[in-house]
Amino acid sequence: MQSAILMPAAALVLWSLVMLFWMAGSRLPALSKLGGLGSAKPGGRGQDLEGVIPDQINWKAHNYAHLMEQPTLFYASVMILAILGAGSLDVALAWSYVGIRVVHSVWQATVNRVPVRFALFLLSTFCLIALAIRAFSATLGQA
């Protein structure tokens, strides 16, 4: 069962890389219209592009940043469950979290209407809360 709980984590890692390439693939052409990377100010960061390139292009970067934030708690919870023994409910919760996060990514990168985006975030957070509680319980030997 340990490999079953690790599969959704691996899938989210791959999805994060998809978002990285989607972000780069949309930002680089926008930057080339502004003179390319060579004209970027020294020490410039991605945040410096806010208000410089179109919002729709920055949405992918926003989502990529989000995939580097809350999912760290997901990875920790999954690792705890993988080490201590995951059940089928844990695997289902992990896949649900990943599936919702992928839908959230696509929504944020394309449509980005906040009420739907927030609902997707909330649903994934509920899955994460359940996983975290189950991971904590597993550490107490009660799972």
Image: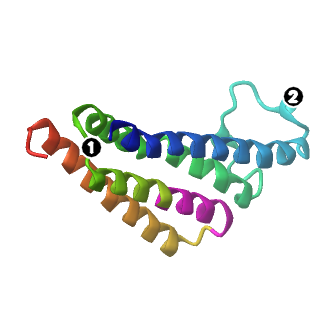
CA neighbours of label 2 inside 10 A, class few (<14), some (14 to 19), many (20+): few
The structure residue drawn at horizontal position 25% and vertical position 48%, both measured from the top left corner, is 87
| Figure quadrant of residue 71 | top left
> In the image, what residue type sits under mark 2?
Gly
Outermost residue, front direction? 1
The magenta span reads 100-111
Q: In this orientation, does residue 6 appear?
A: yes
**Which mark is on residue 38?**
2
Distance from Cα at disc 1 to Cα at disc 2: 49 Å
Does the stretch in magenta take in 81?
Answer: no
> In the image, what residue type sits under mark 1?
Ala
Outermost residue, top direction? 42
Answer with left or right where residue 43 lies relative to residue 105.
right
CA neighbours of label 1 inside 10 A, class few (<14), some (14 to 19), many (20+): many
Is most of the magenta stretch helix, strand or loop? helix
Q: Which of 63 and 76 is in front in this view?
A: 76
Answer with left or right where residue 33 lies relative to residue 136.
right
The structure residue drawn at horizontal position 49% and vertical position 59%, both measured from the top left corner, is 99
Helix or strand or loop: what does disc 2 sit on?
helix
Q: Which of 46 and 137 is in front in this view?
A: 137
Residue 76: where, in percent of width, then height? 33, 36
Q: Which of 49 and 70 is in front in this view?
A: 70
Q: Quickly name the residue at label 1.
A: 86
Residue 7: where, in percent of width, then height? 46, 42
**Which mark is on residue 28?**
none
Q: Nearer the viewer, residue 27 or 53?
A: 27
Of the image marks 1 and 2, the number of the one nearer the N terminus:
2
Q: In this orientation, does residue 69 appear?
A: no
